Image (tube, helix red, strand yellow):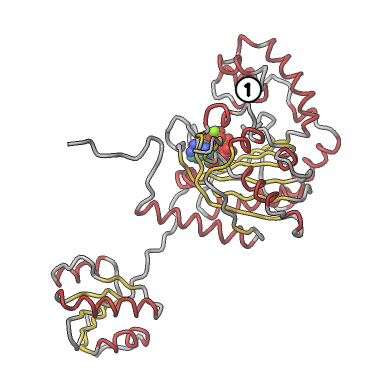
Amino acid sequence: LSAAIQAPRGTLDVLGEDAARREAVEAHARRILSAAGYHRIETPAFESTELFSRTVGETSDIVQKEMYTFTDAGGRSLTLRPEGTAPTCRAYLEHGMHKLPQPVKLWYVSTFFRAEAPQKGRYRQFWQVGAECIGSGQPEVDAELIVVLAELLQAVGIRDTELHLSSLGTPETRAEYREELIAFLRAHADEVSDEVRARFEQNPLRAFDAKDSATIQTMQHAPKLIERLTGEDAEHFASVQGLLDEVGLAYTVDPTLVRGLDYYTRTVFEFKSQALGAQSTVGAGGRYDGLIAQIGGPDTPGCGWASGVERMLLSSGEIPVAAPVVDLYVAVAGDRAVPRAFRLACDARRAGLGVQLELSRRALRRQLTQADRLGARYVAIVGDSDPAALREMASGEQAELELAGVIPTILRGSRLT
Ligand code: ATP
Ligand code: MG
């Protein structure tokens, strides 16, 4: 006997109550994002590897150790998408969306893939709701995106979130600051983790992302990028804060917030929830004014966020989930009744009713139990000839009638006796 095949490590099946809660998250996202003028986009599950190495960054965790990369039969290097911003920008460019009125607002709810050590809130295939606003560099874009994400998190019942906000300035500011930070890390090399020590010459900013307390302690005293912002960057950052103040959305300016992806410029933000423990970030994003140029397009500003669906579900209380409505359960009295019962179920659905047909050919008594369990309003008991019986479950009233009369009777909602 061979062992039963199981799902790959770090993946999950979406079923039952979990599926219903996810649908609720998706419905809230669709409602809130559509109302804010975002249009749905879906991109392929895999892309050219280069799309991610050029934008997310060669020295980022994602590119260095988390990508599922393979070579196809044509010798091309492809990667299962680890994130949604670069693919969305690729699509914006490829479909000439710069010709549309700007900015272009797009949203998605899709699966992403990262080869990470699986743990609570961290999977190898996971879902994100994401929003991208491409084609305007104004601070109101950043602020609007942040407010929309706050609204989504609130709608799905995530309380006690904390908004962390910072600015990474322009690449030029960052290049100068980088040297300063490397000098600091060289001077404190014996106080940081081995991992940080091995990588800071390559990517010093990542040291702020370290999770060990010794490095965190040291980095508190490091020079901060936010103190080196140029005039326009500082102005942009102040405007974003001013707009958040305008609507009373609380935030903490966090100079250690750097984010793990290289494409960010200026504004970066994260919503954290204490309910999540180690994986405390629910949703995060920022501005990426250089990204489209990095993939061969014209200079185009952009800003966006992504929020992990599993983490939203882990950190939310009850999301009200509506059970599917069963207006009619079609019970089948005998094998020869199957065609008539089948026709009634199809006709009733076409008439707009929520219908479940008995599909296991149970004994009639057990069919009624099943109908009751599903909360069916009516049960039609269909034999191989008329009359059929129609029972209203709440009152227990039952009437005999022609099969053709079942649907009109339910639609009228009239009393049976
Ligand atoms: P972390 O610091 O937790 O690794 P990240 O900075 O890599 O997060 P982003 O790339 O900003 O995460 O992705 C945005 C959101 O997607 C995260 O805030 C989180 O909710 C979710 N997310 C990221 N990686 C995973 C994963 N492996 N499993 C589940 N959700 C994830
Ligand atoms: Mg990560």
Nearest the eye: 308 or 69: 69
Q: Amino acid at mark 1?
A: Ala
Q: Nearer the viewer, residue 398 or 297?
A: 297
* Residue 281: x %, y % from top left: 55, 38
Q: Residues within 10 Å of mark 1 (few under 14, many from 20)?
A: many
Q: Residue furthest right?
A: 231
Q: Which residue is drawn at the image coordinates 51% and 53% (left, top)?
A: 156
Question: If the picture is divided into quarters, which one holds ligand 2?
Answer: top right
Viewer-proximal residue among 251 and 291:
291
Q: Quadrant of residue 328?
A: bottom left
Q: Is residue 21 left or right of residue 237?
A: left
* Residue drawn at (59%, 55%) of the image: 41
Viewer-proximal residue, 386 or 222?
386
Dot 1: what SS? helix
Quadrant assignment for the N terminus:
top left
Q: Tell me if residue 116 comes above or below residue 101 in the rendering.
A: above
Which x, y percent locates residue 189? 64, 11
The C terminus, quarter of image: bottom left
Q: Is residue 39 visible?
A: yes
Residue 275: tell me if it is visible: no
Q: Position of residue 317 (x, y in %)?
A: 45, 49
Q: Residue at x 77, y 40 (%)?
A: 237
* Relative height, residue 15 to residue 35 (above, below): above
Which residue is identified by label 1? 207
Number of dots carrying numbers: 1
In the image, taking residue 406 as reference, residue 252 lies left or right, namely right
Indicate yes or no: mark 1 CB to ligand 1 under 8 Å: no
Q: What x and y, as percent, mark residue 332?
A: 19, 75
